[in-house]
Image (tube, rainbow, N blue to C red):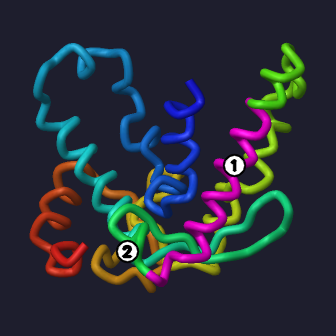
């Protein structure tokens, strides 16, 4: 059971999983008609938009902070075993060990030791989402407020805009953008 959960705990340390607003990108679709259709072009475009931001954040990395106040740069997925990600990978290992230690302590005590899930030891090691949303990082491709970076191929552009039929326009722009082909 813990090994299954550890996969998702590990995702907390992958930059592309930290601030990509997947819920926004799927707003209004979850559980509705889109969930019942085997292939849906709109959902595919939204998923691909999410993937582009995920890949960009993983490649460029994000400066993150944990609840203990420690600050570091997190990369993700393809960069997991690259030297540039050593610090992040070591922090992930300590987080996973804290989680395993807590599970083992519960086993030995034959009871749940921590009643509040927000107080699990692992959460003190994991990056805090809000810390990745500030101006210390490159500009997000999408925001939680429904905006899109005005210059999609420029991570330094902090101007965002709303876009009519964003999912179709943005997906087409991203698909043909040379910047995103390298991620």
Residue at the (42%, 44%) spot, across then down: 22
- Locate residue 165 relative to residue 160 in the image: left or right: left
Q: Which residue is mark 1?
A: 97
Question: How many C-alpha atoms fall within 10 Å of the one at disc 2: few (<14), some, or many (≥20)?
Answer: many
Task: Say whether residue 100 is magenta.
Answer: yes
Task: Give the distance between the C-alpha atoms of the residues marked 2 and 1, in whole angstroms.
Answer: 26 Å
Q: Which residue is mark 2?
A: 59
- Report the front residue among 144 and 126: 126
Rendered view: 52 above or below 59: above
Rendered view: 170 above or below 107: below
Q: Nearer the viewer, mark 2 or mark 1?
A: 1
Secondary structure mainly formed by the magenta segment: helix
Q: Secondary structure at mark 2?
A: helix
Residue at the (43%, 65%) spot, across then down: 76
Task: Say whether residue 31 is magenta.
Answer: no
Rendered view: 103 above or below 60: above
Residue at the (43%, 67%) spot, across then down: 80
- Residue contact between numbered discs 2 and 1, judged by CB atoms under 8 Å: no
Residue 87 appears at what percent x and percent y?
Answer: 61, 76
The quadrant the C terminus occupies is: bottom left
In the image, the segment drawn in magenta is 83-103
- Locate residue 98 relative to residue 149 in the image: left or right: right
């Amino acid at each position: 059971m813990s090994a299954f959960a550890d996969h998702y705990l590990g995702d907390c340390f992958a930059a592309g999983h930290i601030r990509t607003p997947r819920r926004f990108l799927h707003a209004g679709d979850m559980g509705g008609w889109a969930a019942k259709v085997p292939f849906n072009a709109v959902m595919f475009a939204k998923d691909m938009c999410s993937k582009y931001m995920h890949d960009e954040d993983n490649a460029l990395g994000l400066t993150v902070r944990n609840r203990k106040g420690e600050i570091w740069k997190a990369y993700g997925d393809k960069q997991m075993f690259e030297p540039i990600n050593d610090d992040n990978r070591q922090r992930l290992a300590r987080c996973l060990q804290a989680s395993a230690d807590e599970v083992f302590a519960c086993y030995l005590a034959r009871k749940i030791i921590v009643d509040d899930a927000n107080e699990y030891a692992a959460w003190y090691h994991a990056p805090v989402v809000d810390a990745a949303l500030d101006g210390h990082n490159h500009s997000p491709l999408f925001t939680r407020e429904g905006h899109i970076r005005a210059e999609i191929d420029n991570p330094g552009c902090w101007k965002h805009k709303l876009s009519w039929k964003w999912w179709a326009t943005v997906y087409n722009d991203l698909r043909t953008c040379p910047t995103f082909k390298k991620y």
